[in-house]
Image (spheres, helix red, strand yellow):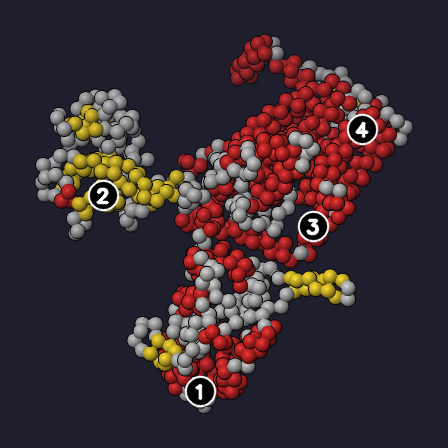
Amino acid sequence: MRCRKEGGCLMNGLLNWLDHRTGYRTLMHEALNEPIPGGAKWKYVWGSTLTFVFAVQVITGFFLWSAYSPSTLTAWESVYYIQNVMSYGWLVRGIHHFAAQAMMILLGLHFMQVVIAGAYRAPREVNFWLGLVLMQIVLGLSLTGYLLPWDQKGYYATKVATNIVGVTPVIGPQLQQIAQGGTSYGHHTLTRFFALHAGVFPALLVGFLALHIYVFRRHGITVSKSDETKPAGSFWPDQVLMDAIACLGVLATILFFTVWKGAELTGPADPSEAYSAARPEWYFLFLFRFLKIEEVDKLGLAFGALYVPGAIMGVIALMPFIGHWKLGHRFNIAFTFALLAGASFLTAIALKEDAADKNYQAAVKAAEFEGHRAAELAKEFGIPPTGALSLLKEDARIQGPKLFARHCASCHRYNGHNGLDQVRMKEVEESGHKVKVEEPATAADLGQFGSREWITNVLTNYHSTFEPLKNAGEKGEKFLDGEMAGWVKENAETLKKSENVVSLQSLVEFLVSQGGRKEMQPFDPVLVTAGKEIFKTGKLASGFFTANCSDCHALRLADGSESLGDGAGPGYPTLTGYASRQWLTDFVKNPGHESFYGPERNLMPTFESKLSDKELKHLIDWMVGEYFQSK
Amino acid sequence: MEPSSSFPTDKTAPRRSFLAAAGSIVIGGLITLTPLFSGLAFFMDPLLRRRAPFKGGDADGFLAVTNLSDLPEDGTPLRFVLRADKVDAWNEFKDQSIGTVYLRKLPGNQIVAFNDTCPHLGCKVDYQEASKTFLCPCHASAFQLDGEPMNKIPPRKLDTLESKTDPDGKVWIKYQDFQCGVEKKGAV
């Protein structure tokens, strides 16, 4: 052959040389010139999209591998680093994360196309089974991959899966321990899952995929009866173009979610902390909900989690034989759609229930917040060798609300909730039925404690501030009827007078300045000085207090320069450093101390022995806003 | 490519086939290269982002090493360990050794600081009391007291570091590592 252009000639020469030595042209021809009776069709694209997404996973997976470190002290940390610090890490991880989910959907579509087309029938039975094996491998990849970030969500979701493995008859516990690398989760759970996820399963997938495609090409595509007689098209280029466009659509969807949502990373896994938002990934949600059905639950975990899914897989595997019978093909299609409908229904119920469950929503939000907080702390302080979890364990912003929920929320509230955005519920009998109702508080809501609003409310609206005490029995009633309550009754009207707006502001400013809390700063010095006089003399712009603050309350200025009063004795709370870290610490330790409520009037338990020094510090630091806050 | 007998034979077919083939190649390339290039960009992270290897220096990055008075008056070099908070990817390790230096005090309290990494291929040089030279145990690079090379093995003299002395007599060093094996001294 003569060639007109120099370059073309060289190119042709090279390709001839290559073909002579490799026979690539025959191979390409074999690969691309598959005849498709009836021509290219959109419904044939699903297998190709699956192969494409797998290639995407291999590519992005390799790069993630280059930055991931599987151990309980480095897994979350390295994923955080990939996601939040490294260049384009969010992009690569996002693609990997959402492509994994796309794969589940495409798997479902491919399966449905195969069943509807009857592609499982002779002589394609073996290829159908190869497909089922591939499906199990993909499920395995998805399960093992979910644990690798070692965040709360992945940790608890995967624990459920390995516990299900543990109820396998006879060999369950052994199987579970082999998977976990021990009796509990640890370094070896991660190294094993990682070896499966990045080594064993991908290798198996490649092998079975090669077989699957080989056998597929042996029998050709399954076309409908009407297409069999039509002239054949070719795989190249018409079907390839359709496949490529479908893959482009899939990739665009993956990128859309990567940019819009991003792969999430909840807080680092914490075996000591219950995770009430534990759910599997959305595509396993139906199984989760299925196990929660009371009748299923009664039959034992092995029944719902192993026998039923096993039986379903068994029926699917038998589809090639069932298809032989008259109506067998219809049964297979009906079975597939019934499964889909059942799974969709259960998923919908699960989503609906979760959407209605405020405490679940709060737990999800808390887990997201912990992830966000851990990342924020890691960025500011770096992660210590003890791991990112220790950052959260030492963080008042995270520990404070938990301690509040555990130790304070049985009486107090924090802006209406228990510190963690959850509402305490209790069961009561109501005309023979057990119903859940909100548990009433028996002490003040401390969400605003020590703020200007709080002090203003105590001075002018005492009864509503401490109203929950009416649920606290006789002592609570006494509190609501005590001297301070009486003082407010006598003076609230005066304080609320429009002439006294500034006077009230001054007194509040003076008191809030005594706490010296950072989050309340800056204090207005003019108001503080004026407030100090009001505290001492009780003289307002219009009128006088019936009794001065200093008549009852002790108060020594923060710098120790002046004492405004020594208090009226035990049970009149000192206002020295009111609502400061120190005041609150002393108060929580022993509220019945003479310089607070005194043993007679106090209702609150003593926490000196109930909380460790560290716990107390975290609780108080959170209440007074003493923790790292990003700008 | 050999023509396939099963191809449609109408006249628009070749043109349509060409468009389909071109479209396949363009889209196929695009969808494969997107994850690949994303991954490669991610892999280039070390080149795309500069990170300080340690935290804890003063505003200019100097670390306090020793007191002026602790250095011998005769200019004999002494080796010191520099300590700071080491940053390694996501981890921060408190108070670690981040490098070693040789310090010499010259007349007039002038300080000469050498990074003790051999500029040849990065082994640590040792000061030899007997010959008053710095010797590298790996490929026998040798340097005079002033850091000038004594043979052809190293590509340049020992790397000096910036130093300063504060009013309290403390010696501060700005620790840096330099590219090995090249003639020009360049911080990495």
Question: Which is more toward the observer, B147 or A310?
Answer: A310
In whole angstroms, how far apart are the C-alphas of marks 1 and 2?
64 Å
Residue A609 is situated, as x and y percent measured from the top left of the image, at: 46, 61
Q: Which residue occupies the extreme bottom position in the image?
A: A543
Q: Which numbered mark, 3 or 1, is in the foreground of this view?
A: 1
Q: Amino acid at mark 1?
A: Ala
Quick check: do tags 3 and 1 share a chain? yes
Q: State the residue position of label 3.
A: A351
Image height of A99 relative to A624, above or below: above
Point out which mark residue A319 bears.
4
Dot 2 surroundings within 10 Å: few (below 14), some, or many (20 or more)?
Answer: some
Q: Circles 3 and 1: CB distance less than 8 Å?
A: no
Identify the residue at horizontal 23%, vertical 36% (top origin). B101
Q: CA distance from mark 4 to mark 2?
A: 77 Å
Cα separation between marks 4 and 3? 31 Å
Quadrant of the rendering where the C terminus of chain A is positioned: bottom left
Q: Up-down: is B20 above or below B110?
A: above
In the image, farthest residue toward the front = A600
First in sequence, mark 3 or 1: give its number.
3
Instruction: Give the chain of mark 1.
Output: A
Amino acid residing under circle 2: Val
> What residue is pinned by disc 2?
B65
Q: CA distance from mark 4 to mark 1?
A: 89 Å
Mark 4 surroundings: few (<14), some (14-19) or many (≥20) residues within 10 A: many
> Which residue has dot 1 on it?
A547
- In the picture, measured across the screen, residue A502 lies left or right of residue A359, that is left
User: Do pointers 3 and 2 mark residues of a single chain?
Assistant: no
As drawn, which residue projects farthest toward the right?
Answer: A326
